Image (cartoon, helix red, strand yellow):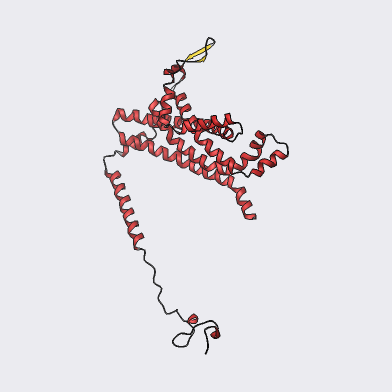
């Protein structure tokens, strides 16, 4: 009696032909239908069409959007928004790097102070911090060296300075965690190698560790920069003349609320789109070395 193994490992069909050699050319190919996907796509298209028609035929005077899109007040506010974004991020990155290094320090005082800074400024709302800086005169009526040089705090703490300190110091708390994660991502052997050739700790950090950590640091910092563009709008509560604040001043006068909000929203989208493209280019630049090393492996 023959087994399946005696027949070359192939079982025979009912007509004696091996199943593996069956001719399937006569079978019709039937495309699979994804009815759930089709229904979901149709519902989404219908919803988007409904929203588009609502905005197109609603009570929105689009000529006012075009009229105020390049208004001097809006463009001035846009410049103030971009300026505050750059300065606040610069302050935040500087504080973040210093705080991250302090967090990793073996000195318990430096490490504890850095942890306290992160805990305090990440644990309170940004708008609260802006209001506290703007009303600092209620705590410190004067600033400077008593008896030598003193300034009235109410004169020094302008909306611009209060916004810069509030946004920048708050950003530093978040950036420090990003930088610390980047530093921890570098292999410990890099620290030992830099130490073995006599590099001081700060020099090793600047020339060896930070360049390698940038691949991890850059993407979240880019996201934080994009977030800062929108976060500057909170400075309107302390009368800083950024774009949203200027748009509010206009619609308080002409009652074109939704139109001015659309103007501000479109400008925010334009700025964020440009920054997103720049972020992609920077990320690709810092990822090139990792890609080449990965290919060699």
Residue 206 picture quarter = top right
- 67 lies left or right of 129: left
Instruction: Please state which of residues 91 and 5 is positioned toward the viewer in this rendering.
Output: 5
For residue 240, say whether it is visible: no
- Up-down relation of residue 209 to residue 157 (above or below): below
Residue pictured at 32% horizontal, 30% vertical: 251
Which percent across, then down, holds residue 264? 38, 35
- 152 lies left or right of 61: right
Residue pictured at 32% horizontal, 36% vertical: 259
Residue 187 picture quarter = top right
Instruction: Please state which of residues 104 and 128 is positioned toward the viewer in this rendering.
Output: 104
For the C terminus, give its image quadrant.
bottom right
Quick one: which residue is furthest to the bottom in this view? 1
For residue 68, say whether it is visible: yes
Instruction: Please state which of residues 252 and 294 is positioned toward the viewer in this rendering.
Output: 294
Residue pictured at 52% horizontal, 45% vertical: 280
Quick one: which residue is furthest to the top in this view? 147
- Up-down relation of residue 30 to residue 278 (above or below): below
Quick one: which residue is furthest to the right in this view? 197
- 77 lies left or right of 6: left
Instruction: Please state which of residues 174 and 224 is positioned toward the viewer in this rendering.
Output: 174
């Amino acid at each position: 009696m023959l087994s399946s193994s005696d027949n070359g490992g192939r079982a025979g069909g009912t007509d004696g032909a091996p199943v593996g050699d069956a001719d399937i050319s006569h079978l019709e190919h039937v495309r699979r239908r994804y009815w759930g996907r089709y229904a979901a796509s149709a519902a989404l298209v219908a919803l988007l069409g409904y929203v588009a028609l609502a905005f197109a035929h609603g009570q929105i005077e689009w000529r006012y959007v075009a009229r105020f899109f390049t208004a001097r007040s809006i463009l001035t506010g846009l410049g103030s928004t971009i300026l505050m974004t750059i300065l606040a991020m610069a302050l935040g990155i500087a504080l973040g790097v210093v705080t991250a290094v302090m967090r990793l320090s073996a000195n318990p005082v430096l490490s504890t102070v850095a942890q306290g800074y992160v805990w305090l400024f990440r644990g309170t709302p940004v708008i609260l911090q802006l209001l506290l800086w703007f009303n600092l005169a209620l705590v410190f009526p004067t600033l400077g060296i008593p008896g030598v040089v003193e300034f009235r705090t109410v004169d020094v703490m302008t909306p611009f300075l209060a916004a810069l300190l509030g946004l920048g110091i708050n950003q530093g708390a978040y950036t420090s965690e990003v930088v610390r994660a980047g530093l921890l991502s570098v292999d410990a052997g890099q620290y030992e190698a830099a130490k073995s050739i006599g590099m001081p700790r700060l020099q090793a950090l600047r020339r060896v560790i930070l360049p390698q950590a940038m691949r991890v640091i850059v993407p979240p910092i880019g996201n934080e920069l994009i977030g800062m563009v929108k976060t500057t709008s909170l400075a309107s509560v302390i009368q800083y003349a950024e774009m949203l604040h200027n748009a509010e001043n206009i619609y308080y006068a002409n009652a074109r609320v939704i139109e001015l909000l659309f103007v501000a929203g479109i400008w925010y989208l334009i700025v964020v789109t440009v920054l997103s493209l720049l972020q992609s280019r920077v990320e690709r630049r810092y990822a090139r070395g990792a890609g080449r090393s990965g290919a060699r492996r």
